[in-house]
Image (spheres, rainbow, N blue to C red):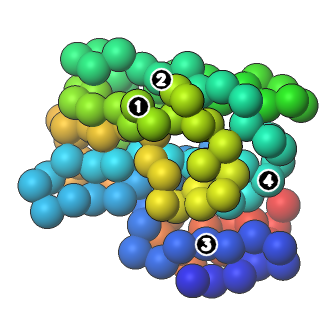
Amino acid sequence: MIEVGEYKVEEGLYYTKDHEWVKVLDDGTVLVGVSDYAQKELGDLAYVDLPEVGTEVSRGDVLCELESVKAVSEVYAPVSGEVVEVNEELEDSPEVINEDPYGNWIAKLRPSNLEEEIKDLMDAEAYAKYLESL
């Protein structure tokens, strides 16, 4: 774990400049969630509008929305692919993202072009440097 001020950055994940994280699983699918920075900026989450299983997304498309007492924020697909699973626990308990942003994923994708698209994501060290620049 890398700490940047009050924010934690989990090692072994890939990150976007929009503060999503990607964890590549052994079966070639990926989990997508939001970083500690994102959940702290949003504040207490009240609702997660999960994507539908079977939805095809392109990198940069809106994957879902997170609603907090402060704002509604869009979560963007960090890679292209098909939504193969969603974290249904978030429907009843969106606050678990605030409690553990790296332990609570939003959606699982079957990426269509992971080898190419992962090159555009940041590793934990690069993301930590990015946070320092904000």
Callout 1: helix, strand or loop? Answer: loop
Callout 2: helix, strand or loop? Answer: loop
> On the image, numbered disc 4 is attached to which residue?
40
Label annotation for residue 50: 2
Give how far apart the Cα atoms at labels 4 and 3 are.
Answer: 13 Å
Is 132 placed left or right of 34 in the picture?
right
Front position among marks 4 and 3: 4
Badge 4 density bin: few <14, some 14–19, many ≥20, Cα 10 Å: some
Give how far apart the Cα atoms at labels 2 and 1 are.
Answer: 8 Å
Which residue type carries mark 3?
A: Val
Give how far apart the Cα atoms at labels 1 and 4 are.
Answer: 22 Å
Which residue type carries mark 1?
A: Glu
Residue located at (35% from left, 59% from top): 23
Marked residue nearer the N-terminal end (4 or 3): 3
Label annotation for residue 9: 3
Front position among marks 1 and 4: 1
Residue located at (83% from left, 44% from top): 43
Indicate the position of residue 79 as horizontal and vertical percent values.
Answer: 36, 40
Query: 132 above or below 64?
Result: below
Q: Is residue 8 visible?
A: yes
